[in-house]
Image (tube, rainbow, N blue to C red):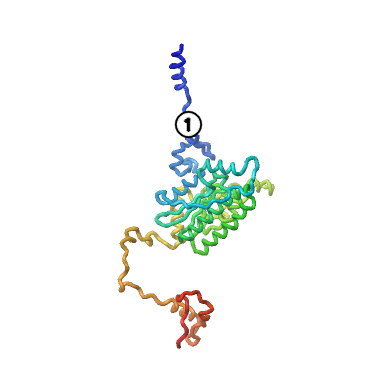
């Protein structure tokens, strides 16, 4: 009977054995319960076709969908000590970090890169909710600051895709310190007169909403995104009242003036491109093509426009509102305002 055990039984086992199926082959829509084939969902930018529900996207997928041809240069971030407080609840904080890094392939909750959006150079950063709920810790805070300063260095618009549950409790006061630190980085963008656009995704709450996420020049949100500080359940338990329908959702915040627009994910890239060009005062025709830049030569001497000296415009501005008898307004001595540049010095009156 050995032939039964050696030949027949293994063949029967192979026939009856269950095939291994990927865990994410089918995805269930949280709103309608419909099952969607994962590759179809991926091709539709993780928007459920039937219900239009916007599911969460990974940080790398966000950047690929944003930049031209999905090509961008990743921005590297400095390392920080993993667990300065030696925090432990049910598990050690270092173990949670290790699991999150293994699951997502990221070092922390934020990924950033520089590239082009319809030919315009930009810097973009994305928070990934898969990494400990996109929480804001010291590593994420440093990453945001580094990405913003990269935009200042490149003189480019900065786009942030926010998705977070707030400050990371395992880092205590050190995580809360990232709120003023990132706010200062936003101020550096403002001083450089560079656009800062925030895209709210589901969900954006806690200290992230209370700091850099609400400091953008333009606030864009995806449909149905939860945006707020405390969650609706906590608010209901605190005030002991029933909240309005769709409270803290992007459409509700748009109606109440908290955000500027709600944009479908399929239209998001074009909207961000238009906003960046408008805020940079630039049009498609203003940017020279690569071929034009390579063949550009020095203009002829006859074609050079003779611009008036800067001090002539200052004198003209000083004369506004004064009669000819009054003469130009007195300017402070050069020694009082010496910035080392001849451009801004006004020559003495020789009359």
Where residue 345 appears, as percent x and y from the top left, is 47, 78
Where residue 48 appears, as percent x and y from the top left, is 48, 41
Horizontal side of 3 relative to 223 (left or right) equals left
Task: Give the residue displayed 34% in from the left and 58% down from the top.
Answer: 290
> Is 235 situated above or below 155?
above
Tell me the element at label 1.
loop
Q: Nearer the viewer, residue 270 or 303?
A: 303
Task: Give the residue displayed 32% in from the left and 58% down from the top.
Answer: 291
**Residue 287: in sight, yes or no?**
yes
Q: Nearer the viewer, residue 196 or 299?
A: 299
The C terminus: image quadrant: bottom left
- Residue 117 sits in quarter: bottom left
Where residue 110 appears, as percent x and y from the top left, is 52, 49
Q: Nearer the viewer, residue 222 or 90?
A: 90
> Is 155 situated above or below 230?
below
What residue sits right under mark 1 in the picture? 21
Q: Check the image and name the residue furthest to the top.
A: 1
> Is 28 situated above or below 177?
above
Report crowding for label 1: few under 14, some 14 to 19, many 20 or more residues within 10 A (C-alpha).
few
**Residue 260: in sight, yes or no?**
no
Where residue 251 appears, as percent x and y from the top left, is 55, 50
């Amino acid at each position: 009977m050995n032939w039964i055990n050696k030949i027949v039984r293994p063949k029967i086992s192979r026939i009856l054995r269950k095939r291994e199926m990927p865990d994410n082959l089918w995805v269930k829509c949280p709103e309608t319960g419909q099952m969607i084939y994962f590759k179809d969902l991926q091709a539709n930018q993780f928007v459920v076709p039937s219900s239009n529900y916007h599911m969460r996207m990974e940080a790398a997928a966000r950047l690929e969908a944003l930049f031209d041809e999905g090509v961008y240069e990743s921005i590297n971030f400095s390392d920080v000590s993993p667990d300065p407080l030696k925090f432990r609840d049910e598990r050690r904080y270092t173990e949670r970090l290790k699991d999150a890094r293994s699951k997502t392939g990221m070092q922390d909750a934020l990924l950033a890169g520089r590239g082009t959006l319809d030919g315009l150079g930009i810097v973009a950063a994305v928070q990934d909710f898969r990494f400990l709920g996109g929480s804001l810790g010291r590593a994420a805070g440093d990453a945001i600051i580094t990405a913003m300063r990269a935009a200042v260095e490149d003189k480019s618009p900065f786009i942030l895709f926010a998705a977070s549950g707030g400050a990371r409790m395992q880092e205590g006061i050190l995580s809360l310190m990232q709120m003023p630190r990132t706010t200062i980085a936003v101020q550096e963008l403002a001083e450089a007169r560079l656009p800062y656009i925030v895209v709210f995704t589901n969900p954006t709450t806690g200290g992230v909403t209370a700091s850099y996420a609400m400091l953008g020049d333009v606030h864009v949100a995806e449909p149905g995104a939860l945006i707020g500080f405390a969650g609706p359940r906590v608010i209901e338990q605190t005030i002991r009242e029933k909240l309005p329908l769709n409270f803290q959702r992007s459409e509700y915040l748009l109606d109440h003036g908290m955000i500027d627009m709600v944009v479908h994910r399929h239209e998001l890239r074009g909207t961000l491109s238009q906003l960046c060009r408008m805020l940079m005062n630039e049009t498609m025709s203003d940017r020279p093509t690569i071929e034009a830049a390579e063949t550009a030569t020095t203009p002829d001497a006859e074609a050079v426009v003779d611009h008036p000296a800067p001090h002539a415009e200052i004198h003209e501005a000083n004369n506004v509102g004064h009669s000819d008898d009054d003469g130009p307004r007195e300017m402070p001595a050069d020694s009082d305002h010496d910035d080392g540049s001849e451009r801004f010095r006004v020559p003495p009156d020789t009359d």
